[in-house]
Amino acid sequence: MADNDSLTEGKRFAPSVPPRTEPYPLKGSSGLDWGMQNRLARIFRPATGRTVMLAIDHGYFQGPTTGLERVDLSIVPLLSYADALMATRGILRSSMPPASGTPFVLRASGGPSILKELSDEQLAVSMEDAARLNASAVAVQVFIGGEHETQSVCNMTRLVDQSQRYGIPVLAVTAVGKELTRDARYLRLATRICAELGAHVVKTYYCAEDFDTVAAACPVPLVMAGGKKLPELDALTMAYRATNEGAAGVDMGRNIFQSADPVAMIRAVGAVVHESLKPQAAYDRFLRSQS
Ligand code: R5P
């Protein structure tokens, strides 16, 4: 216990020095509570305002996806190269080392498998459990134009209400059904609805034309979804274009863990996202660093 006898008068008040404040300049986050900003700053590197998120949550609707059969073997070696991991609570608790230090975004919706209508999701995690797991954000699928559009939007808004109480940001994942076109018009609609209804971050696909208008119309950070496996140079080109056109990073899965060399690939993606390395240069780096 502090001893009153040795109390001295403080002198370091520096009255002429204005208080130092270091705002966290992530798009759309200045009005958020400190805890929210602190969690977002774990995901989006303060130095670049961008993230390389590694998505490995595929099993929540499609079981043991190629590359994720044994996440202890395939994913743990990638953790130190990711700014954040996107995963289910089952995989976190069973297979991810709690001491890895990599922040994670917790998959919080689910229900239907690939054998059923995918838009028929419900919330699948309580915010209390997300807090218990120390999640840096929670992720929910939103199916704009899908069969269960309203239900999925309500999943998101319920999660946002809970997130405000706990200070855990919500990442809305705009899911695109087979029948929907991934053009800028659709992506502007889907991403803007998510942001308007309270999502703190939105994940969406890249579109070759006018992606910059999708990013500009979304008042919170957009992260680009990877999608199906592409040749490495194509995936790096897509990541470069998306970040160059306004995305605050990527949330990629198959294009990293299904790569011929996942470590070399995630490092190349990191160079594109954080150093704005051109795609060909990043690809050359990928080839050089293959183990
Ligand atoms: C999106 O629907 C889910 O979060 C996926 O499991 C994941 O994000 C997909 O990642 P990728 O398309 O890059 O493999």
Image (spheres, grey):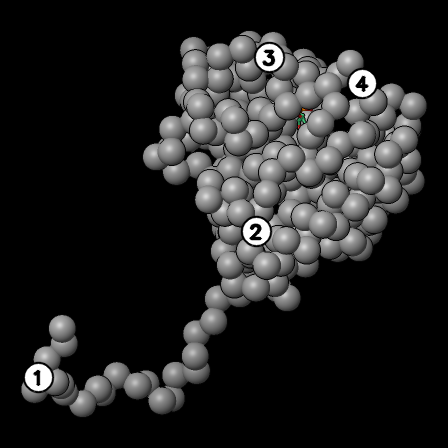
Spatial CA span between label 4 and label 1: 71 Å
Q: Nearer the viewer, mark 1 or mark 2?
A: 2
Q: Give the class, few, some or many, for how many residues have Cα within 10 Å of label 2's Cα (few <14, many ≥20).
A: many
For marks 1 and 3, the one nearer the N-term is: 1
For marks 2 and 4, the one nearer the N-term is: 4
Tell me, yes or no, if residue 138 can be seen here: yes
For the C terminus, which image quadrant? Answer: top left
The relative height of residue 166 versus residue 149 in the rendered view (above or below) is below
Q: Which residue is mark 4?
A: 116
Query: What is the residue that sits farthest to the left in this orientation?
Result: 5
Identified by mark 4, the residue type is: Lys
Give SS at disc 4.
loop
Query: Which residue does the image show at 79% across and 25% down from the upper left?
Result: 118
Rendered location of residue 103, percent (x, y) = 47, 40
| Ligand 1 contact, mark 4 (Cβ < 8 Å) | no
Q: Which residue is mark 1?
A: 6
Identified by mark 2, the residue type is: Ile
For marks 4 and 1, the one nearer the N-term is: 1
Query: Which residue does the image show at 58% across and 24% down from the upper left?
Result: 56
Give SS at disc 1.
helix
- Left or right placement of residue 12 versus residue 60 in this view: left
For marks 3 and 4, the one nearer the N-term is: 3
The picture quadrant where one finds residue 181 is top right
Image region (quadrant) for ligand 1: top right
Is there CB contact under 8 Å for labels 2 and 4? no
Query: Which residue does the image show at 90% across and 31% down from the upper left?
Result: 147
Rendered location of residue 282, percent (x, y) = 57, 25
Rendered location of residue 170, percent (x, y) = 65, 47
Spatial CA span between label 3 and label 2: 28 Å
